Amino acid sequence: MHGCDPGLSTGGSGRCLEHWKGPKPVTRSKTYVDRRPAAQRRENAAPPGSGKEKKDVSPKRTGLTVRLPFGGPIRPEGPGEAIAAGRKPSEAPGKTRNREIGKKGRAEKPLLNASKPYCANIQHCQQASTHQRDQIMQITDVKLEMFKWPREVPITNGLYTYTHNLLNIVVIETDDPQITGIGLAGGIEASPEVGEAIIGHFKKMLVGMDPLDNERIWREMWRPKLVGRRGITTRMLGGVDIALWDIKGKVAGLPVYKLLGGYTDRVDTYVAGGYYEEGKGLKELAAEMASNVELGARAVKIKVGAVPINEDIERVRVCRETIGPDVRLMVDANNAYRHYEAIEFARKAEKYDLFWFEEPVEPDDYIGQREITRATSVPVAAGENEYTRYGFRDMIDHRAVDILQPDALVLGGITEFMKVAALAQAHDLDIAPHGSQYVHIHLVAAIPNGLILEYYRDTVDPMHGKIWQHELYIEDGYVHAPDRPGLGLEPKWDVLEEFRV
């Protein structure tokens, strides 16, 4: 008894609680493993704090039950954890507690009640879902909301001219009235009815499923023999997946970037622009670049490939002289060149210190793109037209790119994006995603190999700053990740209604 004072409580165990270090480890043969079906295990669960938790009757279990963070599975509290928490091992069951399990299996850090998940911003926590995970959430509806508005002046890149902006919102409703998922899907300008049909197809299998099972749902949707390996089907699948991650964040009371890894809360950013427009010459291009720098950008991008190479080199020269040597300059050809043309352009542009040369050739020309990377000191960036981890695997295997540019709205959603990011990290490649800043801010902030965020302002989208309740802004070259649960996207439906397709 280590010379204990006889008056010290032994908690009914015959041991001195002051010196007792917890039970000795038991052998594997004596460890109890609950192998009951999940539904039967949930019968012993009850809402935290209700005082109605059922006592665990499994062998070798004592005292209180411990509910893991965010209403996870229930397990028994061991005597050692009771001692660490200042309670007697024989103490009768009471209200459930949330405890975080430390490296050695001990409960070390108290957490918030499961009905109020952790959030960096307590005001947003109060708005988070109270849906309990001992009751499986279900998807009740899936729909696609499409909107389209005109640009004042059409814009042109290396190959394409755009007269309108598009917005495709995937909405997933659940049996919790407080939880609705908002996702964005890649463009389907030519055939909006096809997008609706694909979402209708997915809806048949999704209704009734748990929206937190994103891996299972992704696998159920992605059936190449039935719905296609790439193209519109994968874009719609991605929109669904993004909405599912929005739901995950809202259930947990966390922004998505925190759920995915939370590497940083702000990311380096560049402003995309420099399109060809009617009546836009070198003077107007220079004014646009100067405006981007005044906005706070420390990196800018322009389009090339629609005019002769020497004319584009002159555009690059004007931009470099306008923004100065300390602001990074990217160029984007949007697949306009043959590989030998791209090599000519890159060599002539090297003296202007380009940060990258984006999409010089067709997306499937891995061999041509590899030749470009070997022929110039300018890094080659590509990937916005690539689909799934398999496409990026092949691109990496061909060493056809220096910087990867996956687009979650195109390649298959956030679930697939994170696999591409991990694949890139394994090959020491950086990620600079293409497209929507509203989704990709979370993804760049979540990963250690996130390089920079693409940002579209009102010079590209006339509705910028008008369609979301919360806007993202550049501050000293950075965009800060939202601290609201989920993706933090709240559409202004009344404003958008005018532009419904």
Image (cartoon, rainbow, N blue to C red):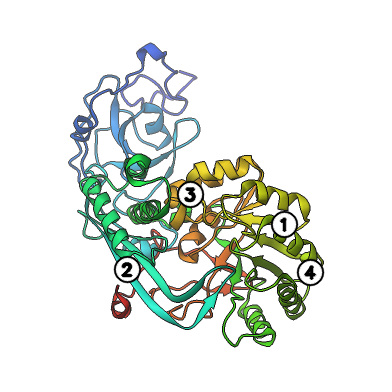
Residue that mark 2 sits on: 146
Q: Of callouts 1 and 2, which one flags the residue occurring earlier in the amino acid sequence?
A: 2
In the rendered view, tell whether residue 226 sits above or below residue 16.
below
- Quadrant location of residue 41? top left
Where is 332 relative to 100, above or below?
Answer: below
Q: Residue at x 69, y 72 (%)?
A: 308
Mark 1 surroundings: few (<14), some (14-19) or many (≥20) residues within 10 A: some
Residue 13 image-quadrant placement: top left
Q: Which residue is mark 4?
A: 352
Q: Quadrant of residue 67?
A: top left
Looking at the rendered structure, the kind of residue marked 1 is Tyr
Separation (CA) of disc 3 from disc 2: 22 Å
What residue is rendered at 31% in x and 44% in y? Answer: 71
Task: Say which element carries label 1.
Answer: helix
Q: In the visual, does 230 lie left or right of 401?
A: left
Q: Nearer the viewer, mark 1 or mark 2?
A: 1
Task: Name the residue at 55% across, 58% down.
Answer: 433
Residue 442, disc? none
Q: Earlier in the sequence, mark 2 or mark 4?
A: 2
Callout 4 amino acid: Tyr
Q: Earlier in the sequence, mark 1 or mark 3?
A: 1
Q: CA distance from mark 4 to mark 3?
A: 32 Å
Q: Which residue is mark 3?
A: 387
- Judge the density around disc 3: few (<14), some (14-19), many (≥20) Cα neighbours within 10 Å: many
**Is there any visible trace of residue 67 in the rendered image?**
yes
* Number of dots carrying numbers: 4
How far apart are the alpha carbons under marks 1 and 2?
40 Å
